Image (spheres, rainbow, N blue to C red):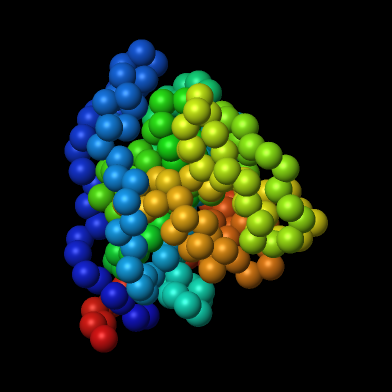
Amino acid sequence: MECFIIQDMRVQALHGWKVSVAQAREIQLSLAKRVVTENRVVNPRLIAGIDISAPDAQGVARGAAVVLRYPELSIVEVREAQSKIGFPYVPGLLSFRESPLILAACEKLCNVPDLILVDGQGIAHPRRFGLASHVGLLLDLPTIGCAKSILCGRHQPVAEDAGSHAELHDKGELIGAALRTKSGVKPIYVSVGHKIDLASALQWVMKCCLGYRLPEPARLAHLAAGGMLTSEPSCQGTLFD
């Protein structure tokens, strides 16, 4: 398998995970101030998608990270991690429930992506710190939130043509956009995760769409999290070109 290693895939230890609901909210408010909303994405070679499955009857879920080569959008690597979910379901705090398992899958990657599309919110969140922002900050990588449903804010109707979008506002602040990725299907909700601006986020989401509602990295990550995408073999070498 080709490898494009440019750095170690490491998670920054910004906080612990054994926290109360109140502590989790305080962590979100504190870390939201560190989110970068300026574009740092230039000519990405590798774009990843990440997602997590719903827990099974035993409380075990699967986190998945899928790395694609751009612009071909062909699979380079798939990594998964499984464990019990350790944080309760609390609206607005899903990143504390989902991030540990997603990060465990990301740490197995031997190809460090230039951009990550996250099935979740970025700053389109009551405390401006959803899953995409949380993961982006912990990995110190550009991330985009690509959520299937709205969490907060309002927007005008979105035109039916693919690529049309309407700005999403909350309390007078622009927090994202409803984006029609395919004619005749519901829009998705795109927001800045980390190290990108909204205009660039919308552009990259559309560039990664291959005729489905979800952009290809996120779509494949959803399949992998559901156990429907076979993991790639371990990386054996490094390619610089």
Total label count? 0
Could you say which quadrant of the image residue 134 lies in? top left
Q: Nearer the viewer, residue 105 or 38?
A: 38
Above or below: residue 184 compared with residue 188: below
Above or below: residue 36 compared with residue 49: above
Q: Residue at x 51, y 74 (%)?
A: 73
Residue at the front extreme of this rendering = 172
Above or below: residue 239 compared with residue 122: below
For the C terminus, give its image quadrant.
bottom left
> Would residue 83 be found to the left or right of residue 16 on screen?
right
Residue at the bottom extreme of this rendering = 241
Q: Nearer the viewer, residue 211 or 105?
A: 211
Q: Is residue 80 visible?
A: no
Residue 225 lies, in percent from the top left, at: 54, 51
Q: Is residue 7 visible?
A: yes
For the N terminus, give its image quadrant.
bottom left
Q: Residue at x 51, y 42 (%)?
A: 176
Residue 22 lies, in percent from the top left, at: 36, 13
> Would residue 149 be found to the left or right of residue 9 on screen?
right
Q: Nearer the viewer, residue 111 or 81?
A: 111
Q: Residue at x 74, y 53 (%)?
A: 159
> Would residue 158 be found to the left or right of residue 232 on screen?
right
Residue 107 lies, in percent from the top left, at: 30, 53
Residue 111 lies, in percent from the top left, at: 31, 68
